[in-house]
Image: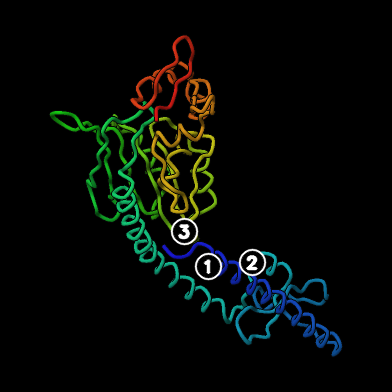
Amino acid sequence: MGNKEEIVDEIELARKHLEEDVHKKEIEAEEKLDEILSKGKMEFCSRCGKKIDSRMDWGGKCLHEGCENLICRECWDSEKRFCRKHIDDYVKREKKRAEARPSRIKRLTLSYMDFLRDRFEKFECMDWTPDGPIEKPVFKVKSKSYGKFRIVVYRKGWVRKEPKLELLVIPNEGNIERLISDFMEAERGIHSIIIFTGDTASIRPETKEFVEKFSDKRVSLFMEDLETNKTYFNPKERMTEKYSSWIDPSKVPMKFRDILAEIAESMSGRKIISAKKFSGEFGVDKKTGMRILGECKFLEGIKGTDSFILKE
């Protein structure tokens, strides 16, 4: 997956170089403008062709390496920073980058799929759903295919396995809003964790906003920027936030017992968790919290209270 800090440093360095280049072009434009004005000459914008005869109407020089053509302020402020001679080269270069992006997303996503499978094997998979703990959880990778990757977590019974939770990895190569809408129309009967994957350039601001505002008790939705290892989700969805420890490569996966131990209070050398505290942490009502805690084999209820002792 690469070192997160090194990747962030590279991005910051590239951004700094770009800012320095733009600033340099603006200074060079000022110098050339001084030369033009000193000779009493008049020039035209090399991008839009508009006649320019005022110093304040110039924005900068064409960003193509070695080009001396001036760009007017209106074009420059509209991000049109290449002259007509070099804009085609810039467009072709960006088109090649865009065409290469799907293959890059595929490579990153395949690596992330391997990471998730290894994580489930190492930590013995998730063991809870929004409805409560999963007794004797086991998992199976139902599909290893790119674009259809799917892991299902089951409750292991005497005769058969009962599906309780599914995790899907989908590359960010389409309209996420439409994909989620189509997905929600089908009644699946189990909680779904959906992870869209992409690189930084493929994640549009409106897509990020959609993911960070998404709220539905049937689905925990994530967007994983595999270029920077940044995980996006709705932090107000408490259950989704708890699942992020499995989705985010920078976090350590937590089992249900670990989560409860983390929010429990220590009293007389024992860890105590109340239904009120649990309900607030997981975003459920107190009655549901009491039921879920009562189903945990590693908890012992304290008679006459809404609290439970975490067994050693």
Q: Quadrant of the C terminus?
A: top left
Camera-near label (3 vs 1) is: 1
Instruction: Give the image location of residue 100, x and y in percent.
Output: 39, 69
- The amino acid beneath tag 3 is Ser
The residue wearing badge 3 is 202
Q: Residue at x 63, y 73 (%)?
A: 18
Q: Which residue is mark 2?
A: 79
**Quadrant in which residue 243 is drawn:** top left
Label 1, on which residue? 6
Q: Quadrant of the N terminus?
A: bottom left
Q: Earlier in the sequence, mark 2 or mark 1?
A: 1
Q: Observer-nearest residue: 193 or 300?
A: 300
* Most distant residue in the front direction: 268
In this rendering, position of residue 19 left or right of residue 178 = right
Residue 122 percent location from the top left of the image = 31, 50
Please indicate whether residue 85 sits to the left or right of residue 252 in the image: right
Q: Residue furthest top?
A: 304
Q: How is the image coloured?
A: rainbow
